[in-house]
Amino acid sequence: MRGISVFWLIAAVLALLWLVVSSNVPPSPQLLFYDNFNMTLKGQPDPAWHLPQSASYKAARWIVSDQESYTIEKAPLGQPLLSFTGSPDWQDYRLELDVSWASPRLDNAVVIGVRVRDADNLVGLFYQPGQPVLFKTKREGHWQAVEGQQALLLQAPLNSNAHLTITVEGDRYRAYLGDQLIVSATIPGFPSGYIALQTAMADFNGTPVAAQFDNLRVLKLSP
């Protein structure tokens, strides 16, 4: 009988320890969206991504898959290229993705949109080689600077590959290059929304900026 009592005592202690440890382990983030762009036929639009219904984008060409990443097609002169995905109800989340260029140039630029209400209302992270990485807001079709943001990376790297992470939690926005925090801002007025990818406008020869996106995932942040 004594042996049985000791067994149950040990079992109770182990169960208590498991409860203590498990209560201190944060839950795994919920995966909201993932796309490595390998499932789409070459040259075909990815069905998960959509063009905005906006007059300023009506002539834009779709962003297509090369079966390894998401890249852009030729666009009319001065035409931005944007597509979006997700849900208008997404609130607090972490967006991770790889960005690269076939031939990095100072005029290469991408905008990674979060809390996207529509094509004319969103928060965008502007990433351009050699330039400060900053958040901007687009309200009723007009881009505006965000006052009071802390920009810690005054010149984005000129190399062709970057792993970017954006977290949005309440009105707090943060962006990371690898594990390095590069900008943070408090931005009210955008409680939820889609995500979006936008390239810079085509250059004066009508050649689009050859931005590529890969390994994109969105994780819900636990309340």
Image (cartoon, rainbow, N blue to C red):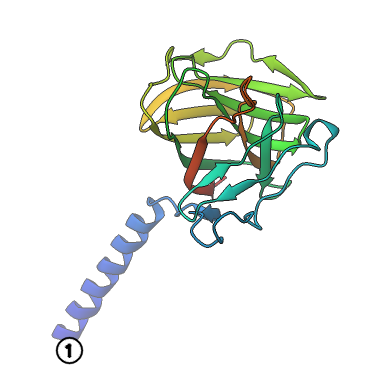
Q: Is residue 57 left or right of residue 26?
A: right
On the rendered structure, is 162 left or right of 85? left
Which one is nearer the viewer's eye here, 146 or 16? Answer: 146
- State the residue lying farthest toward the right: 55
Q: Quadrant of residue 40?
A: bottom right
Reply above or below: 198 against 20: above
Say which residue appears at 53% left-offset and 35% top-offset: 167
Q: Is residue 106 visible?
A: yes
Q: Residue 35: where, in percent of width, then height?
A: 52, 54
Quarter that holds the N terminus: bottom left
Q: Quadrant of residue 59?
A: top right
Q: Is residue 221 visible?
A: no
21 above or below 99? below
- Residue to which mark 1 is pinned: 1
Relative to 89, does residue 115 appear above or below in the rendering?
A: above
Residue 88: where, in percent of width, then height? Answer: 74, 46
Q: How many marks?
A: 1
In the rendered image, which quarter is residue 18 located in? bottom left
Q: Position of residue 191 (x, y in %)?
A: 71, 35
Of 48 and 123, the residue lying toward us? 48
Secondary structure under badge 1? Answer: loop
Q: Position of residue 212 (x, y in %)?
A: 50, 40
In this rendered view, identify the residue nearer to me: 139 or 27.
139
Amino acid found under the numbered disc labelled 1: Met
Name the residue nearer the viewer: 13 or 99. 99
The residue at 69%/22% (across/down) is 137
Q: Residue furthest left?
A: 3
Quadrant where the C terminus lies? Answer: top right
